[in-house]
Image: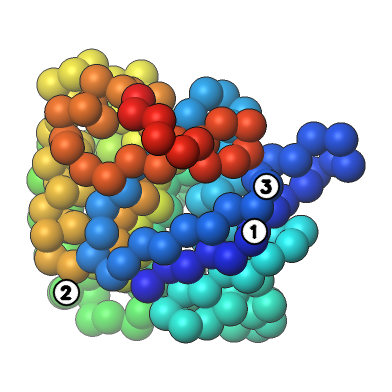
Amino acid sequence: MIQLFHVSKWYQKEVPALQDINLHIPKGDFVFVTGASGAGKSTLLKLLFAEERPTNGQILVHGRNIARLPFSRIHTLRRETGIVFQDFKLLPNRNVFQNVALSLEVLSLPQRDISRRVWLMLQRLGIQHKMRANPLTLSGGEQQRVAIARALVNDPVIFLADEPTGGLDHEASMKIMEVITDVNARGTTVLVATHNLEMVRSMGRRVIHLEGGRIAQGVAP
């Protein structure tokens, strides 16, 4: 499913964001990516989403080398991938419902199907009562759940989340992880970057720990 071969990413010559990463993530796996701020977690997710290009190495997703994927074909990769950014990237000129529906509109689904799927996803995340609200009027936690709903509503092949429970209390965090776990159980490959080590331990999933842009060997968070 996802393979990285000797992948490095340099933003500046003196400071590598990622260095010589070799990684294999099978289809349907659920992986946490941990590490201190600046360890390379966000960079790794951006590379998998093709928001950034590696300086060196190959990244294969479904056998496609996305490190060399033409920009004209990146949209195909992104339609198969749900991603939650730390800054959410919600559209202020669309309400909550419309923000979530956007992921389905690009697939040209019938409006009836879009409405049903968006409503069910908002309900699962407990924000259906906010569906007509402007996202900028919501709390940070509510905006977070809208971003997660948008990323998951089209049943992506791959789900990437950068701190999806950041700033939430334990109960709210676990509810979100229940939704992500359910999506994973239906076959979606999941990578979650997080500082929440208590949650990581409680989930009992595979952990990739980054230190200074490298995968740390034999390190349990």
Q: Is residue 216 above or below residue 43?
A: above
Q: Is residue 219 above or below residue 206?
A: above
Distance CA(mark 2)–CA(mark 1): 40 Å
Which residue appears at 70% of the width and 60% of the height? 54
* Label 3: which secondary element: strand
Label whose residue precedes the other's in the sequence (2 or 1): 1
Which residue appears at 24% of the width and 20% of the height? 198
Q: Is residue 109 above or below residue 67?
A: below
* Label 2: which secondary element: helix
Amino acid type shown at disc 2: Asp
Whether residue 45 can be seen here: yes
Residue 113, label in figure: 2
Question: Could you tell me residue 137's position as x and y percent?
Answer: 39, 27
* Label 1: which secondary element: strand
Name the mark nearer the viewer: 2 or 1.
1
Q: Which residue is mark 1?
A: 7
Residue 219, label in figure: none
Residue 131 as seen in the image, left or right of residue 219: left
Whether residue 138 can be seen here: no
Q: Quadrant of the N terminus?
A: bottom left
Q: Which residue is mark 3?
A: 19
Residue 154 as seen in the image, left or right of residue 20: left
The image quarter in which residue 24 lies: bottom left
Which residue appears at 21% of the width and 27% of the height? 201
The image quarter in which residue 158 lies: bottom left
- Near-viewer residue (143 or 50): 50
The image quarter in which residue 69 lies: bottom right
